[in-house]
Amino acid sequence: MGRSSQVEREVKLGVWPGFCLPELDDAVEGLHVVAGAECHLHAIYHDTPDLRLARSGVTLRHRSGEGWTLKLPTGEGRKDMLSRRELTVEGDDQAVPDELAALVVAWVRTSALAPVARLQTRRRSVSLVDVSGVVAAEVVDDEVSVLHGQHLALRFREVEVELGGRADPELLEAIVARLRSAGAGPADPTPKVMRALGPRASEPPELADRAPPGNGSAAEVIRSGLRASVRRLLAHDVGVRLGDDPEEVHQARVATRRLRSDLRTYAPLLDEDWAGELRAELKWIAAGLGDVRDADVLLEGLERGVARLDRQDAGPAEALLDRLRAQRSAARERLLEQLGDRRYALLLDRLVDAFDDQHRLGPVPAVPLGAPPVITSADRWLLPEAGGPASDVLPTLVGKPWKHLRQAVEAVEPDGPNEELHEVRIRAKRCRYAAEVAALALGRPAKRLADAVAELQEVLGEHQDAVVAEAWLRTVAPELPPAEALVAGQLVAGQRQTAERTRGSWTGAWDQASRRKLRAWLTE
């Protein structure tokens, strides 16, 4: 089944029943108007019973003559403009194609998709075309009828201006200005289906961001930090599946790492069995993400090294990289199998149920020292001690990963194995994550420590990448033909230089991160 993809950029304007589309021939110089035929469209929109897609700005529909379309917000463009990635798959209206159903798992999870709205649209359109025949923009005048069974539930009219793929966004200004002068209302970026579904579709999405109060409880801060990581994982799920941008895998992996690290740091305040089971499930999916991400990092590093080689080595170098690309492809196939497993959907359900405020009975209040802490029944994964003030509880908990980091640094020998530096990097990452969560309540002191430790992590990350790249090259070297082996040898030398350079420079980053004033707020 073929799938097409494009980015839709459009502005919607509400219009009154007597509105007439103005002449647009002279609206933009160099463009002329081509009228389209009037058509009647029938669309059925699908969503979960609680409208998770609509609440996140995602739409999934079947439209007569067009097949299935999934629209995903890009987060780009002006506030009054809808910018959405549009994926279209052929098929009848009997069932959502598996290809699109897989892309909305982060929202649907173990729930089910079902028809939630049926719209009939009478559409009249004009296209603005340049001298070469390329459509720069399309203006459509839609009269929309929302049906409930056989009855008319709602009727509204709107005008859409959609830019062509290569059109300048400033073109919108001229067309919208002409429409407004003709009596159209202000831009309204509300999709048709959200208007049809009413207020429920405008409710906050799951895991909506809500910063904890500065004087809040440790529970509120921990929940907020964990919620942000779950939100990151869900936000990048569809990008991981599409596979267009390696950064999507990176961000999803970071989300799982942060969750596992924070569950470890704040374990004294969490139900042991609950946290242990969740960390085990996160480790399972993190492994799949890690295999792909490690291959991406390795490939990116080796491509930089190949770019510095002589031109005569280009062919063998590309053949060598193809071996790594094949490994990456195999890792991605394994990851997609994991993402399609019901086990993954159950994990996402568990994460959302735990950290989404809409599943809770109310906030966990901070309590005075000595008073019994209060935890709601919706937060059974938190121990009573989590109800204490964040300013009192968190410095002690963050002090532990800081202590482990310091001990790992002290254990490094000048000419010791690379594993020692890798252990420092792991400890630095855990300390950074813990401090970043604490910064939600403690502010700048915790943030400055997190930033300094992040610099240390960055230097050691470069060292580890070079070590891993050299190890991979040495592993494949015995099976390489002579020309590729020669290239591998040159690349090994480059990776060795990087490892030696970072081994000699990481202590400067540690000196900055270990300044006493950065950790004055910690309870070690």
Image (spheres, rainbow, N blue to C red):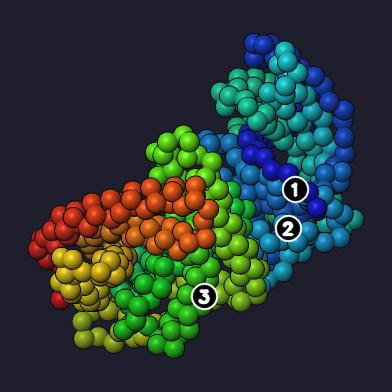
Outermost residue, left direction? 516
Mark 2 against mark 3, which lies toward the viewer?
3
Residue 377 seen anywhere in this rendered image of the structure? no
Q: Residue at x 27, y 79 (%)?
A: 388
Q: Marks 1/2: CA distance? A: 9 Å
**Which residue in the structure is indicated by mark 1?**
3
Give the camera-side residue of 295 and 15. Answer: 295
Q: Marks 1/3: CA distance? A: 30 Å
Residue 325 picture location, percent across and down = 56, 53
**Can you say whether 338 is above or below 280 in the image?**
above
Q: Marks 2/3: CA distance? A: 24 Å
Q: Are marks 1 and 2 in contact (CB under 8 Å)?
A: yes
Identity, as a three-letter code, of the amino acid under mark 3: Trp
Residue 143 picture location, percent across and down = 80, 37
Q: Residue at x 57, y 63 (%)?
A: 331
Q: Earlier in the sequence, mark 1 or mark 3?
A: 1
Q: Are marks 1 and 3 in contact (CB under 8 Å)?
A: no
Asked whether, in this view, residue 193 is left or right of residue 517, the answer is right
Identity, as a three-letter code, of the amino acid under mark 2: Glu
Instruction: Categorize mark 1 by other alpha carbons within 10 Å: few (<14), some (14-19), many (20+).
Output: few
Q: Are marks 2 and 3 in contact (CB under 8 Å)?
A: no
Outermost residue, right direction? 150
Q: SS for tag 3?
A: helix
Residue 417 picture location, percent across and down = 25, 69
Q: Residue at x 60, y 34 (%)?
A: 187
Residue 1 seen anywhere in this rendered image of the structure? yes
Q: Which mark is residue 99?
A: 2
Give the camera-side residue of 517 and 64. Answer: 517
Instruction: Categorize mark 3 by other alpha carbons within 10 Å: few (<14), some (14-19), many (20+).
Output: some
**Which residue in the structure is indicated by mark 3?**
284
